[in-house]
Image (cartoon, rainbow, N blue to C red):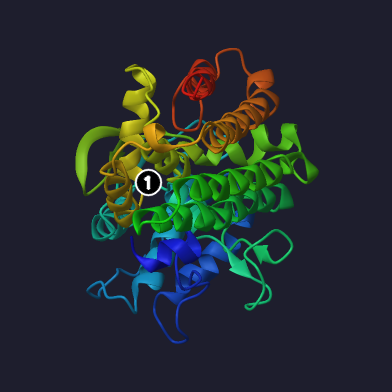
Amino acid sequence: MEAKFTRRGFLPEPDPATHFPAGSELSFLDELGRDLPSLLQDPGFRQYARELTIPPWRDPVTAENLPYLRLYYVRLGFLASAYINQVPLPPETVLPRNIAVPLRHVCELLQRPPILSYDGYALYNWKRFRPDGPIALGNIDTIQNFVHMYDEHWFILVHVEIEAIAADILRAIHEFQLGGDLNLSLRTMADAVWRQVAVLKRIPEKMDPNLYFKTFRPYIRFFENVVYEGVDEKPTSYRGETGAQSSIMPALVSFLKIPHRPSLLTDHLAEMRRFMPVEHRALLAEIESLPPVKPLAAKEPFNELLEAMATFREVHFGWAELYIHRHVQDPRGTGGTPYRQWLKQLIDETREFKIA
């Protein structure tokens, strides 16, 4: 396991780039990103967006410019989702050439589908107020947003702190890989997940359920039968941004070898890996290759970790009920899935795997 994962979890190291270098033609995208929430208030936004000249990404990918490549993806991903899903207009079915072509190019470089996903919405979309302070609520803010409401900042930043805590989970897995005590690793992981639960419970502090559903949730929904002009004239559908694209729970499930029965749910979770950063996919494959730990584990720490995971999913389910289900008869998640039945299955199967 690369050391960066034990320091940052699935967050990038160094911190995400917040703007392009002074004098760069790409600085135009910083200005556009800053203005996007205001531009979206105008029903003529789509016409404005079709007339934009988007500077192309011209350089080969290097370790030095990777943060800027990710920022380019964030700016273009937000712009594309803003165009397709502008509130309160009906979803658009054609992404214009001037946006579709550069978005497709940057996503090919990052080896991912051409739509804003969890990585662009959360993993690469934060900055610290105090660079030497923690990656935690109170010391972080977003780089890009769809709306002028702190509710959206908060929604993203809660996920960023949860991702930062995941470094302790990956460090514990790594220490076990190196021959460390399994039960100590399980206790460390359980403690981290309980801390993630505590952060997730803070969602309502600064996020109104009515505002979430009506104002910024529509922007992260899936693309359905969208033509990418200049790329492919055949309509294409992509999953929208969703927490199922986070690598934290898949890493835990892979490490513990929790058996989830084959279903549309497991197919969906497997598909979500396409939307994860390529290095995250590689790490999940590495963790999956580890031998089963349940036969080696003590009952108490193993079951405690499973209980923490199930509780995290229960809190998530509760927020889905509050923020989505109460507003619509037949809800689908932003990824396009019937989440209610699937989340319950995950919770039940996690607890069923405990040592008797």
Helix, strand or loop at label 1? It is loop
Q: Is residue 283 above or below residue 194?
A: below
- Give the amino acid type for the residue marked by disc 1 in the picture: Ile
**In the image, 263: left or right of 123?**
left
Q: Is 35 left or right of 98, judged from the image as shown? A: right
Q: Pick whichever, 331 or 136, lies toward us.
A: 136
Q: Residue furthest bottom?
A: 23
- Residue sitting at 79 percent across and 44 percent down? 205
On the image, numbered disc 1 is attached to which residue? 115
| Residue 18 image point, x, y percent | 53, 72
> Which residue is drawn at the image coordinates 66% and 41% (left, top)?
197
Please state which of residues 354 and 86 is positioned toward the viewer in this rendering. Answer: 354
Q: Foreground residue, 107 or 16?
A: 16
From the viewer's perspective, is 317 left or right of 177?
Answer: right
Residue 192 shows in this picture: yes
Judge whether 12 appears above or below 316 on screen: below
Image coords of residue 7 (percent x, y)? 48, 66
Which residue in the rendered view is the most extreme toward the top? 329
Q: Position of residue 353 (x, y in %)?
A: 46, 23
Does 109 sit above or below residue 113?
below
Above/below status of 321 relative to 154: above
Tally of numbered discs: 1
